[in-house]
Image (cartoon, rainbow, N blue to C red):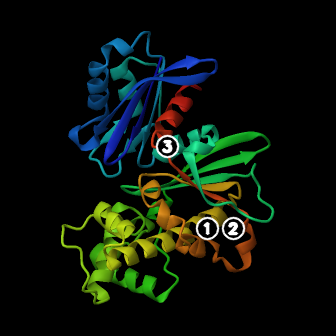
Amino acid sequence: MIIAGDIGGTKARIGLFDRRGGKVALVVSDQYASKEFTTLEGLLEAFLKAHPNAVTGPLEAACFGLPGPVINGRVRVTNLPWEVVQVDVAQRLGIGKVKLVNDLVSTAAAIPTLGESSLTTVYEGRGRVDRAGSCVVVAPGTGIGHALIHREGGWSVLLPSEGGHANFAPTTDIEIDLLRYLQPKLGHVSVESVLCGPGLVNVYSFLRDTQGSTTLIDETVSASIIATKALEGTSPLATWALTLFCQILGKHCSNIVLTFLATGGVYLGGGIPPKIAPFLLQGGFLEGYLKKGKQRESVEATPVFIVNDDHAALYGAAAIASTL
C-alpha cells in the first residue's frame, strides 16, 4: 500500500492507495486543518488511527507534497511552523521509501492523468499549438506555487520553483501605485504579495485606501468575501479588485511561459482559480496574458486550463510514491 499527502498552509489531504494494474487506486482519504497539528508525523498518526481497517497490507512507499523548497530531504513549510525531515517521517511510519516534494511538483505529477472533466479551458491557444511541449503549473491559493513539467524526447521531468517569491513586476500606472502602496508595509513585494488569497486582500485594500471608493465591504475583509461579492456583483470595489488580480495573474502566467518556453500549456492549480473561473473567462486575464510584445506569438500558441480536481496534488503524490 501507498500513503500520500497534499499538505497546504490551510488544509491537508492524506490518502491510502493500492497499486492496481500499474496505476494507483484510492482506498480512503481524509482532509484536515493543517494548523491543528504541530508536525506532519502527528497528522499522519491521526489519519492512520482514524482508518485502521483501511490498511490491509504493509505500507511500502510514501510521498508528501509540501509548500516550500525541499533541500536534501528537508523542508521548512511555508505558512506553517513545521520543519519536515524525510528520514524522520520514514522512521515514524516504518517505511523505507519516503519522498518529500514541493506541493506543486505533486500537482504537476497529476497533470498527465487529468481528463477533460477535470479541466476548464480558459484559452485554447492559436497558431502552432505544441501539445507535446513543456507545461507549467501556476497555483494561487494560500500562497502561490509554480512547477515545470519539462518534456523532451518522450521523457518528462518535474521541476520545482519558488518563483512566487520573485519581485512583483508592475507594468501599468495602477500596478506601479500598488507596488508603492505595498512597499512600506511589506518591504519585499513579491508576486505572492499580490497573487494569492492574502494578495487579493492586499489588492482590495490598496483600491479602498487610494481610489476613494465609498462602496466598501462591511464585513471583515477576506479573500473569500471579496471573491464572493465580486462574483455576485454586489460590490464594485470587490469587482475591481478581482479584475485587477486576474489581469496581473495573466501577465505573470505568460512571463512563466516565456521563462521556461513552456508552450505545452499553463495549468492553473491551487484553491483560487476554480472559485473565480467566471472572472478568468471574462477577458481581463487573457488581455494580460497575451500582452507580450515581440514574443506574443509564442504565448498566443500556449493554451491555459483551470484544474478543477482539488485532489490532483494528492493523486500526483501517490503517483510519485508508486515509482519509488
* Image mark for residue 309: 3
Horizontally, residue 172 falls left or right of residue 114, namely left
Q: Earlier in the sequence, mark 1 or mark 2?
A: 1
* Camera-side residue of 290 and 109: 290
The amino acid sitting under disc 1 is Ser
User: On screen, 245 above or below 50?
Assistant: below
Q: Earlier in the sequence, mark 3 or mark 2?
A: 2
* Camera-side residue of 131 and 189: 131
* Image mark for residue 254: 1
Q: Disc 1 on helix, strand or loop? A: helix
- According to the image, label 2 marks what residue? 299
Q: Position of residue 86 (x, y in %)?
A: 41, 32
Q: Residue at x 38, y 17 (%)?
A: 94
Determine if residue 72 is in view. no
- CB atoms of marks 3 and 1 within 8 Å: no
Q: CA distance from mark 1 to mark 2?
A: 6 Å
Q: CA distance from mark 3 to mark 2?
A: 25 Å
Q: Residue at x 55, y 24 (%)?
A: 24
Q: Position of residue 106 (x, y in %)?
A: 51, 40
Q: Disc 3 on helix, strand or loop? A: loop
Would you identify the image quadrant in which residue 244 lies? bottom left
Q: Position of residue 257 (x, y in %)?
A: 64, 63
Q: Disc 2 on helix, strand or loop? A: helix
User: On screen, 194 above or below 208?
Assistant: above
